[in-house]
Amino acid sequence: MSKEQRNLRAGDSSETTDAAKPRRDIANEAAAHALRLLEKVRHASEARLAKTDTDGDGQQNAAPHAVVIGGGIAGLVAARELRQTGHEVTVLEATGNFGGCVRSTEVAGLRIDAGAESFAVRGGVVASYLDELDLGEQIAATSGQPAWLIQGEDQEILAHPMPATAMLGIPGNVRTDEVRAIIGRPATAMLGIPGNVRTDEVRAIIGRPATVRAAADLITPMSKKWATEKLSIAEVVRARMGQAVLDQLVAPVINGVYSTDPAKISIDAAAPGLRQAMQETGSLARAVSKLQASAPAGSRVAGINGGMYTMVQALVAQLEEAGVALVRNCAATALSHDPQAAAPYAVRTLGQELHADRVVLAVPAQPALELLNPLFAAEQQLDSDGDANAIALAILVIDKPELDDAPRGSGVLVSKQAPLAAKALTHSTAKWPWLADESGPGTHVIRLSFGRIGEHENLVESGDDSALIDQAIKDASKILGVQLHRDDVLGSTVSRFSDMVPLQGEAATARRTALQHNLSDFEGLDVVGAWIAGTGLARVIAQARSAVAISAR
């Protein structure tokens, strides 16, 4: 499809705008719609409270009412569980869209994921849930294209394929001729790496001396303390394989995937099962190799044909069909609790008060704690994470046939030392066959991510979308090795995220523990979402389902 055809498909708003038409006040219309829905919910809630049993003992006959605050994935999953256990459910979403970090956008006539674009296959949690939503047959495998790594200093850029045996950047194969000479052929054979794996992949990135240092992991005894003590990814990799592996292989992956430092992520949260495998095999490399044997490259993540937002659409459709009240543009402003009341919780929103038997908070940490802290004693109140956490995703649809050969595979992770602002790039049309079919030959979807948790970046925090797109074009040219210009771009957009959470360290663990202790005094009050469950759809879905797994009374 030609560039001219693409431009026609995307549409030119300047030619289609009818200046004679009066402008609709979208914001006021949305607020009015939300108020009308709330009125219906409030009247239904009051009617339920008025119903008592025939003995007149004040007990409700009607189904209990649950209010879910937040309409991201965690909130929608919780709402579905509650509805299936007999609750009347109301979902309050502060924005105009459901899905939270699972979102989509239309660029140049293509529907594109503007948030989460895949899910981890390990454990089968997400795939199983998609089956329940009748989306199992829509699960999409990746193209199998490898990921690449960008290194460099000053203006020098070096691109390498990521080691095929790596997990979170941790290599499962650190063999070289020098290493074999030191530790012997039988020791290297124990890794069980497929025969087609190149032995110089790691050495090409970190150099020969650092590779020899990494291979010391194969012969260094494993401390028994590591079976139980708290460990970060950084601590494990540095001790077992050295600083070079941490800085040049692992840190770019952690920064690209979790937007934070490896020192802030626990090994158990980021890589479930790795600690146990280390104890069983006596080596970090062998542990990685063991875990990767069940998830070979290209099969560790999957998506959905049509994009991950299809999951949100399916959830919303099922909830609407089940009679759940889904209220957009409706932020909860206060939460109160009266254990003596027939419905012990009251949620304040848009000047209305909704009474509920159960409340589920499915919003990020800061708004959740603003609602929760007034319920707690002064000494129990919790602080939200003060780290900078603005993240931005620049999405480009490009007319560039030179990219048909996917010169950097499915995407690229960028070393922090490289002269680039972007921390990662996903070549979406190289990664997802369904999207390549949608876009057609010569047209490509590129997503570049900017910003790291705990670091302030003016480019991200300024809110200047135009500057961010300009930077994305420059960085994409360097990363892909193909010169891109503004007139190659058929369409672009920026998707922004705040209140993001890494799979954090001790401070976050302590906060979660304190929160759970506080909530034990409030029957029927639950908190779900990534800041409690950890990053990733599998964790979010599992925790939301577990939190509300009760029977209707």
Image (cartoon, rainbow, N blue to C red):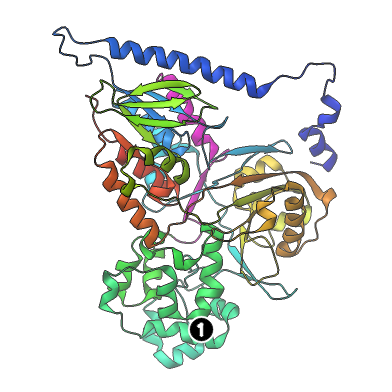
Q: Is residue 330 visible?
A: yes
Q: Quadrant of the C terminus?
A: top left
Residue 216 falls in image quadrant = bottom left
- Where disc 1 sits, the SS reads helix
Query: Could you tell me residue 185's position as x and y percent?
Result: 40, 87
Question: Eyeballing the image, is 513 above or below 130?
Answer: below
Residue 52 falls within the magenta-colored stretch: no
Question: Eyeballing the image, is 8 above or below 275?
Answer: above
Q: Which residues are magenta?
A: 296-323
Query: Could you tell me residue 433's position as x and y percent?
Result: 61, 47
Viewer-nearest residue: 141 or 257: 257
Query: Could you tell me residue 513's position as x and y percent?
Result: 30, 52
Kindly identify the residue that appears in the image at 37 percent across and 38 percent down.
Answer: 374
Residue 452 falls in image quadrant = bottom right
Kindly identify the residue that appears in the image at 76 percent across and 52 percent down.
Answer: 467
In the displayed structure image, the side of residue 550 where residue 480 appears, left or right: right
Question: Eyeballing the image, is 83 above or below 188?
Answer: above
Q: Which residue is mark 1?
A: 211
Looking at the image, which residue sits at the far top? 54
Residue 300 falls within the magenta-colored stretch: yes
Assess disc 1: are there few (<14), some (14-19) or many (≥20) residues with their C-alpha within 10 Å of its C-alpha.
many
Kindly identify the residue that appears in the image at 50 percent across and 74 percent down.
Answer: 246
Viewer-nearest residue: 262 or 453: 453
Amino acid type, label 1: Thr
Q: Is residue 294 visible?
A: no
Kindly identify the residue that appears in the image at 73 percent across and 75 percent down.
Answer: 154
